Image (tube, helix red, strand yellow):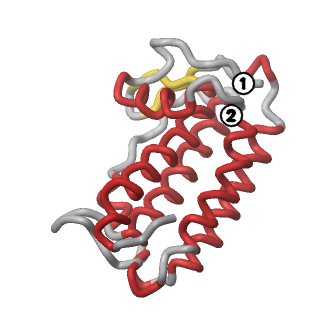
Amino acid sequence: MISRPQPGEFMPYQGVYIECVGNAEVPAVLQELKDSTYAFFTAIPEEKANYSYAPGKWTIKETLGHMIDTERVLAYRLLCFARGEQQGLPGFEQDDYALNSNAGDRTLQDLADEFRIVRESSIYLLRNLKKDREAFIGKSNNNALSVRALAYIIPGHELHHLRILKERYLPGLGIQI
């Protein structure tokens, strides 16, 4: 079990993601979400996948693309810090990533398949994390960030976006999942 991160191991805004996970066991949450998030996205009709709830907001496909990109970035940071990286890692501009992801040109099924594969990789990474490495703190975007905080942020970020999709996107489409 990965212990819960403590204040100072993450930026305050990331606490929202950590709270989404609560006291659940992170590896079990990741495993469960791999299947439930895949099922969620594949249940959305393809003709509704380019919907956004307001002008300037991401579409459903762009949101899933953002979730995939963010998990890759967070897992990379976790890998680096767990291996003892001393150099600071750069931040990333999520809107630029979303703009350049070409998610809108892909099918929702293709994105959901990619999500599941990326998640498998994250599960393997965490499954093989040594307990003595989880408290290691590295620098990301000039901020302290621990391995265990990243482990919590990965599923927490996903849960955050799933909540937004369910609350703001699906009612506008008349979809219940």
Work out whether 96 lies above or below 18: below
Q: Are marks 1 and 2 in contact (CB under 8 Å)?
A: yes
Amino acid type of the residue tagged 2 in the rendering: Val
Q: Residue at x 57, y 39 (%)?
A: 77
Amino acid type of the residue tagged 1 in the rendering: Ile
Image location of residue 24, percent across then percent down? 66, 29
Image location of residue 36, percent across then percent down? 64, 57
* Mark 1 element type: loop
Image location of residue 91, percent across then percent down? 39, 42
Q: Upstream in the sequence, badge 1 or badge 2?
A: 1
Q: Nearer the viewer, residue 2 or 94?
A: 2
* Mark 2 element type: helix
Pointer 2: residues within 10 angstroms few (<14), some, or many (20+)?
many
Residue topped by disc 1: 2
Q: Nearer the viewer, residue 119 or 92?
A: 119
Residue topped by disc 2: 26
Relative placement, left or right, of 135 versus 91 is right
Q: Residue at x 28, y 68 (%)?
A: 172
Relative placement, left or right, of 113 versus 73 is right
